[in-house]
Image (spheres, rainbow, N blue to C red):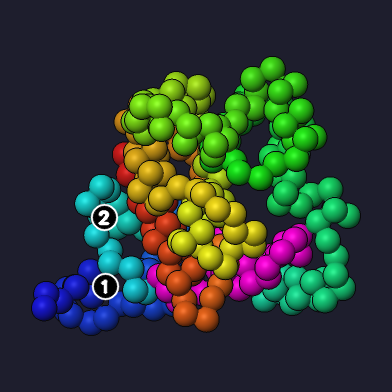
């Protein structure tokens, strides 16, 4: 067995602590700050995502700190702010009151709609792997004059069945991106086997490495990733969902801290 010394200082003393991935950084010396949001009032199906930040923090201590793609980018410093207990308590109270997303203007289900309406400098929204949508959403996409470009799951698969490679599709996607890119990573965009306890699991979805490949290609295209969020992460008794969530988060942190 080869010992993993990545969480030890030169004197061999463990530096694993309550920080994300057991890293010895603070909000003063970390280059990347992760802000946990324990909120699920607008979850329409399964609950549990409000506990995901705490569970991902615990699961992150099991992540090996070497990424052959980005190597030691995390050494620039990653720190996760403490979970806001007051927000968590408010979330629990509102969930018990049965508040639903239909009654809220600013729910996760309408976040990108609100972004497009409130920030005209956001020039384009590229959606990937969409599997569930209603007629009103489809009409909005069609009437957006290509401000919203949507790659449906069905269309991606059909093109691959007919011979298109994922490399060709990613080149096409990236060609439509602006110079500055923000990534909103809904974990339910993955195959449900990777996130079975997400809010609303739907058949289909990506493998983790498909999206990692796309993000790498965004960087090599010369574009700049200015930020990201990771949402819809569920929690489970066996720890599977938060384990996958921690690994997705580690990949995204390395992506942000690479030569970006």
Direction from residue 67 to residue 83 in the image, left or right: right
Residue pictured at 64% horizontal, 59% vertical: 200
* Classed neighbour count for the residue bearing mark 1: other residues with Cα under 10 Å, few (<14), some (14–19), many (≥20): some
**Span of residues in magenta:** 35-60
Q: Is residue 106 above or below residue 201?
A: above
Q: Residue reaching furthest front?
A: 162
Residue pictured at 76% horizontal, 28% vertical: 139
Is 36 one of the magenta-colored residues?
A: yes
Q: Is residue 148 above or below residue 130?
A: above
Return the disc, 2 or 1, that comes first in the chain's sequence.
Answer: 1
Is 110 one of the magenta-colored residues?
A: no
The disc placed on residue 7 is 1
Count of numbered labels shown in the rendering: 2
Foreground mark, 2 or 1? Answer: 2
In x, y percent, where is residue 256? 40, 46
Circle 1 SS class: loop
């Amino acid at each position: 067995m080869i010992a993993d010394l990545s969480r030890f200082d030169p004197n061999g003393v463990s530096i694993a602590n309550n920080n994300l991935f057991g890293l010895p950084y603070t909000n003063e010396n970390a280059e990347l700050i992760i802000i946990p949001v324990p909120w699920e009032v607008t979850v329409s199906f399964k609950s549990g995502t409000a506990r995901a930040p705490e569970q991902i923090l615990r699961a992150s201590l099991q992540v090996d700190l070497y990424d052959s793609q980005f190597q030691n980018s995390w050494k620039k410093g990653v720190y996760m702010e403490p979970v806001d207990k007051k927000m968590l308590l408010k979330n629990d109270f509102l969930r018990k009151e049965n508040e639903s997303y239909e009654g809220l203007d600013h729910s996760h289900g309408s976040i990108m709609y609100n972004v497009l309406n409130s920030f005209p400098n956001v020039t384009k929204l590229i959606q990937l792997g969409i599997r569930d949508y209603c007629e009103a959403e489809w009409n909005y996409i069609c009437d957006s004059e290509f401000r919203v470009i949507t790659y449906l799951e069905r269309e991606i698969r059909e093109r691959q069945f007919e011979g298109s490679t994922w490399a060709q599709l990613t080149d096409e996607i990236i060609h439509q991106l602006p110079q500055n890119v923000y990534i909103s990573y809904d974990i339910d965009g993955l195959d449900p086997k990777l996130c079975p306890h997400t809010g609303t699991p739907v058949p289909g979805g990506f493998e983790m490495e498909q999206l990692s490949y796309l993000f790498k290609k965004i960087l090599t295209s010369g574009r700049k990733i200015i930020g990201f969020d990771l949402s819809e992460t569920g929690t489970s008794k066996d720890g599977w969902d938060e384990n996958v969530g921690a690994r997705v988060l580690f990949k995204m942190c390395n992506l942000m801290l690479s030569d970006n």
